[in-house]
Every structure is written in structure tokens, then in C-alpha cells.
Amino acid sequence: MQMEKKDIRALSKDQLRDFFVANNDKAFRGNQVYEWLWSKGAHSFDDMTNVAKPTRAMLEDNFVINHIKVDTMQRSSDGTVKNAVRLHDGLVVESVLIPTETRTTACVSSQVGCSLDCNFCATARLKRMRNLEPGEIYDQVLAIDKESRLYYNHPLSNIVFMGMGEPLMNYNNVIKAIDMITSPEGLGMSPKRIMVSTSGIPKMIKKMADDDVKFKLAVSLHSAIDEIRAKIMPFSKNFPLKDLREALEYWYRKTKSKISFEYVVWKGINDDKASIDALVKFCKYVPCKVNLIEYNPIDDGEFQQASEESIMAYIKALENTGIVVKVRRSRGKDIDAACGQLANKEG
Ligand code: SF4
């Protein structure tokens, strides 16, 4: 029986160097191949032109490169680009390039489908099929960086983990991908330009703080009242706001990094005064800012964008307390690339 070949990108640089030594070659060959795999984004061993042909053949015999393939690329009328990304096993995830005047941001996926069950989110309906490998996350960024250079004449400036999946349910692979994205041997990007957005898993937020991560943290809050939050995000019953608050205080004590709260206001769900007061109170516990996000309805009618007046009431209450608040208008709506809309409609 033939053994399944291993993805070479699962090997660390040291492991790759050891592999060459064990195969009677020089350790530095490992460095060369590592550079091809990560900073040069090689798709095949044949791309590695400064590696001798017999060595490439030997690699081919032992390994595969499970590179992603951008199946389809759609451009929205507002310049947003959405990639449907095919993985080596045929599954599909989506990633998005969001351009503004001053920056281009990649919104990447961390899981195929999602482990969680947010009622407003199209991805939740796919359920979790599997976690993405570090290389598959890295490749999404690389593909968007190329598109940013092609369409906007500059490299990618920011990354947000707000695509499909809950990044903290695939923690180790997300961290490995970020290590490569920020490493000089990868894309050399500053961790300050990366934001990991979680639905708020207290234990994992504390773990990130203990691991001394340098990227930024966003939390999809959507309500600061347990009962309402549980209606929006049923899994949050297991993670009461009291525990979330405590984890966020811990995060700030350790990292001194402000938290962004992502917050959608829905008609009849969280557009009342009690919800506003609860958010203002919650925001006082820890240095933070609030992003009020415009909602893009998915097929059913349960969740509808709240009125402009309700959003203004939130803004006023937050600003009166000195909390920075921004309204994020949605991008890429015409291609289903907006927040909460990623669901492989093409796949
Ligand atoms: S909003 Fe995020 S965490 Fe919630 S189901 Fe969708 S992808 Fe998962």
C-alpha cells in the first residue's frame, strides 16, 4: 500500500534541514526550499529553479505541496474582491479583499464552515467541515496580496480573521499562519496590522494573552445582555458575559492592547434602550472601541438591519461616555462578500 505523502509545509525549517541531512544532502538546502515554500509561495517543486533536478525529484517522491487554488474571483462594483478558494481535498472557502482610500485589507477564513451557530451568519449553516491548515490560511493572504498589488498598486496592508470560521477553535494553525505572515521568511508583515476576531471564548482569550501574541483582538459582541446574546449566538450560553468580561480584563492587563467590539444592531432584537445602556456599561470595564457594523440580511427575515435612528442612539450614548465608535458600512454586498455572507454560494 502506498503511503499518503505528507504536506511539506507541515515541516518546520529545522525539520526540513534535518530531512536533507538524513538524505545525504546539505542542511542549507532546507533553508532554500523553505524560502521557496513560504516567501516565494512555490506551488510545485519544479518552481524551485535553484534546486537541482534530482533533489526536486526526491522531494516529489516524498512530499506534496497542498497549495490552494483560486477557483473564481469576483469583483464588486465598490472594488471589493472575493475569492472562492479550492483546497486540495476539493472543499471551498472564501476570502475577501477590501480596499479603502488608504489601505487594502484581507478578510480570511480559518475553518471550512464554522463550529459555532450564530443565527445571523450564512457560514453557520455550513457547519464545520474541517480546520484550515496554516499553509491554507497563509495562501489566502498571499493570493490577496497579489490582487492588491495588481488592482491597487500596493501590497496588502491589513489582515482580519473575520471570514469563515471561529479562529480560536483552530488556534494552533491560526497562530502558525500568523507566525509565517509576520516572519521575515514569510511576508514580514507587522502583527499590529493583523486582527483576530472571535465570537468570545473566554478560555482562549486568556490563552492568547498568556502566549503574548502581538496582533489585535476583536470580539463579536452584538449584545451585552446574556439572554439577548444567547438568541443571537446560541453557543454563548456556555460563555456568560461575566466570564467574557473577566477574560477581556485579563487580556488588557497582559497585552495593554485595546479591544474592538464588533456590534450589529438589529431591528427588534437589540435596538432598545436597555441594550444601549448595557453596551455602554460593558465598555467601561476595559479599554475598547466599538464598530457598529451594517448588517447584510441573509435569506430569511429574522434579522433585519435596525433604523438609522437606533444606530444614532447607540453612537450618541457611546460618545457621551467617551467611547470611540465607528460605523462600518458594508462592502461587497453585490457579490455576497459582506460580513456574515460568506457561504460558498458558488461552491
Ligand atoms: S459569525 Fe463567525 S463565529 Fe459566528 S457562525 Fe459565523 S463564522 Fe462562525
Image (tube, helix red, strand yellow):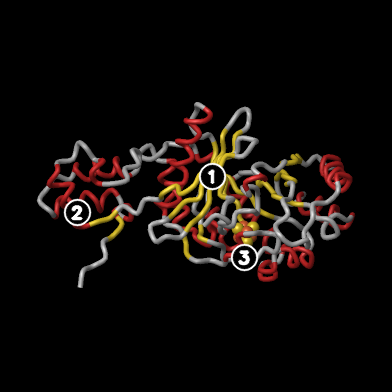
The residue depicted at 39 percent of the width and 61 percent of the height is 89
Q: Nearer the viewer, mark 3 or mark 2?
A: 3
Q: Where residue 290 sits: x, y (%)?
A: 73, 45
Measure the C-alpha gap from mark 3 to mark 2.
42 Å
Q: Which residue is mark 2?
A: 19
How many tags in the picture? 3
Taking 261 as reference, is 13 left or right?
A: left
Q: Secondary structure at mark 2?
A: helix
Describe the element under mark 3 as helix, strand or loop: helix
User: Is 172 situated above or below 261?
Assistant: below
Amino acid at circle 1: Phe
Identify which residue is drawn at 64% across, 66% down: 117
Label 2 lies in ligand 1 vicinity (Cβ under 8 Å)? no
The x, y position of residue 171, in whole percent, is 49, 58
Residue at 65 percent of width and 54 percent of height: 340
User: Is residue 269 or residue 215 the one in the foreground?
Assistant: 269
Q: Which residue is mark 1?
A: 215
Label 2 crowding class (10 Å Cα cut-off): few <14, some 14-19, many 20+?
some
Q: In the rendered structure, which disc, 3 or 2, sits on the residue that comes first in sequence?
A: 2
253 left or right, relative to 138: right
Judged left or right of residue 130, residue 5 is left
**Nearer the N terminus, badge 2 or badge 1?**
2
Q: Which residue is mark 3?
A: 125
User: Would you place residue 5 above or below residue 193 in this image?
Assistant: below
Q: Front-most of 328 and 336? A: 336
